[in-house]
Image: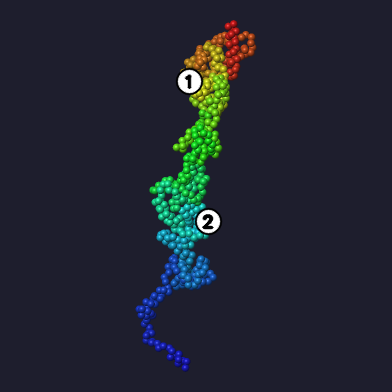
Amino acid sequence: MSKEKQTQALPDFDWEKAEDKGFGTGYSSADRTRLEAMYDTTISPVQEKEVVKGVVVGITDREVILNIGFKSDGIVSSNEFRDLPGMKIGDEVEVYVENQEDAQGQLVLSRKKAKVITAWDNIQKSFDEDVVIDANVKRRTKGGLIVDIFGIEAFLPGSQIDVKPIRDFDIFVGKRMEVKVVKINYANDNVVVSHKILIEKDLEAQRQQILNNLEKGQVLEGVIKNMTNFGVFIDLGGVDGLLHITDISWGRINHPSDLLALDQKLNVVVLDFDEEKKRISLGLKQLQSHPWDSLAEEIQVGSKVTGRIVNVADYGAFLEIKPGVEGLIHVSEMSWSQHLRNPQEFMNVNDEISAVVLTLDRQERKMSLGIKQLTEDPWTQGSLKDKYAIGTRHKGVVRNLTNFGLFIELEEGIDGLVHVSDLSWTKKIKHPSDFVKVNDELEVVVLELDADNRRLALGHKQLEENPWDTFETIFAVGSVHKSTIVAKGDKFATLELPYGIEGIAAIKNLTKEDGSVAEVGESLDFTVLEFLKDEKKIVLTHSEVKPSAAPVAAEKKEERAPKANSSSSAAKSSPAESSSKEGEKSTFGDLSVLSALKEQFEESEKKEKK
């Protein structure tokens, strides 16, 4: 019964139609087209080294199985899906085809490489199309921030974070920020992004509006964004202006930070504007009245004022009476001394001093001051003529040397001139530097005083008696003296005589007995031809020296000398002895000895006359 039912349920089969006519030949063209379409959707061509989309068909503890439409499924490590904790079967992800078939016949895929390739494609697309992208700030680095865009780390320079300088980068770490790609370097896998460029676009319209309405004298509100030694830069709302240090305060300041601070809001006035260069000069002190306008009327020429030194220069110092009101103290007004010195010897910056107003111009806002006027002029002292009477002796400091003499400061404001001819009786001094140096102390005698013209003539050689009065008796015409040739010129030779004085002899008068000419360094007997006291000049000759000349001169001196005075005889014989020793050089020595010698000669002459 059951077999009959089963047989009746089977459909009738037409064996003729199933006759073998070739495999796949029983489909109509429509069926064939439909089947080919179904086949194409099940297996798609896959190329190596490209990114494709795959469907998750299995998930294990260690692997994820993906179907990319290839003849086999691919397996990817689950570690590459850690950024997708909620992934499930049926989700679609992008993977990179590394190999269609490895040694085991397995399809090799990589999601990590797919992410990198896709990220760089997105970065390049964003750069080409100027697209704004979201970035996650991961950490700070030297000079800026490291941000994550499409899974790639990019560099955000500190100068590209904002239009104003950023001093603390840490406040951006962990936050999201809109950026634009500004540079791509594939060789170093380096990407540079900017956030500032987005802000600048927003501020461009505001900046243009400010520039269009900008005019001199306009007062604007701004924020200090940067500070330098020469001034501060102020953000006026999209456009920057420079507030120079000289326009911050009417008084002097060393640095803008003395009065201002970063991020400080303040009102400023537009002083100048260059449309082409878009440079704006700002002022702060111009919003206040000038201190000169409130200067007390009591301050006039001759008034005594007190203030603080704010600057010291080579030519003088500036005294600030009140902020914005300064006067110049020239170096010549610091001391009664006629020799200009360094102003820093008198004062330093921040010193509190008093001064006298010398000139005052309220229109030009200029004032000159002096501090030497606080003391009496030394040239007007009543005791000046007595203190520096002619013949009085003083000690002073050499302040200046000239070709004609030297200036000595006897006291503050009292200077005197010592002519080069008044330095020595015996030496021929061509320049004062051969005799003395600047800052040396020198004793002098007052020769002339003219208080009205502030002139004081001084002398140094006048401290001693004129030795030429004594030399006149020693170096009498015809006397013979042992002398040394120290120099030779074309016509004359210079001789060193006893007592350290010099004489001259013509070259033709240097001929010796053997006919040769005496040379430099030889010591010979010379006869005095001329003794010119006023010119301090002695002319001698060697050619005319006679052997009997020296004894005759000695005998004449003995006749004129006193007979019984051992001490005077010793003094008298000393020059003769010094001249009789060959090759020995005498020196000038103590002038007091010469004075005593002169007195002996004068005393002997008086006795002879009696």
User: Which residue is painted at 43% across and 66% down in the image?
Assistant: 50
How would you rate the neighbour count of disc 2 (Cα within 10 Å): few for under 14, some for 14-19, many for 20 or more?
A: few
User: In the rendering, at what x and y percent does residue 480 appear?
Assistant: 54, 13
Tag 2: amino acid? Asp
Question: Where residue 572 appears, x then y in whole percent?
Answer: 60, 13
Mark 2 lies on a secondary structure that is: helix
Location of residue 597 with respect to 255 vertically, above or below: above
- Which residue is under mark 1? 489
Image vertical order of residue 248 relative to residue 35, above or below: above
Res. 101 in view? no
Q: Position of residue 56 (x, y in %)?
A: 48, 71
| Residue 565: assigned label | none
Q: Residue at x 48, y 42 (%)?
A: 250
Of 77 and 301, the residue lying toward us: 301
497 horizontally vs 210: left or right? right
What is the crowding at mark 1: few (fewer than 14 residues within 10 Å), some, or many (at least 20)?
few
Which SS class for mark 1? loop
Seen from the viewer's position, the closer of residues 410 and 367 is 367
Q: Which residue is mark 2?
A: 170
Depth check, mark 2 against mark 1: the one in front is 2
Query: As drawn, which residue projects farthest toward the front?
Result: 297
x then y, percent, for residue 361: 46, 35
At 54% from the left and 13% from the top, the residue drawn is 472
Q: Is residue 393 above or below residue 324?
A: above
In this rendering, does residue 532 appear at all? Answer: yes
Quadrant, the C terminus: top right
Q: How is the image coloured?
A: rainbow
Q: Nearer the viewer, residue 606 or 301?
A: 301
- Mark 2 → mark 1, Cα distance in angstroms: 89 Å
Three-letter residue code for mark 1? Gly
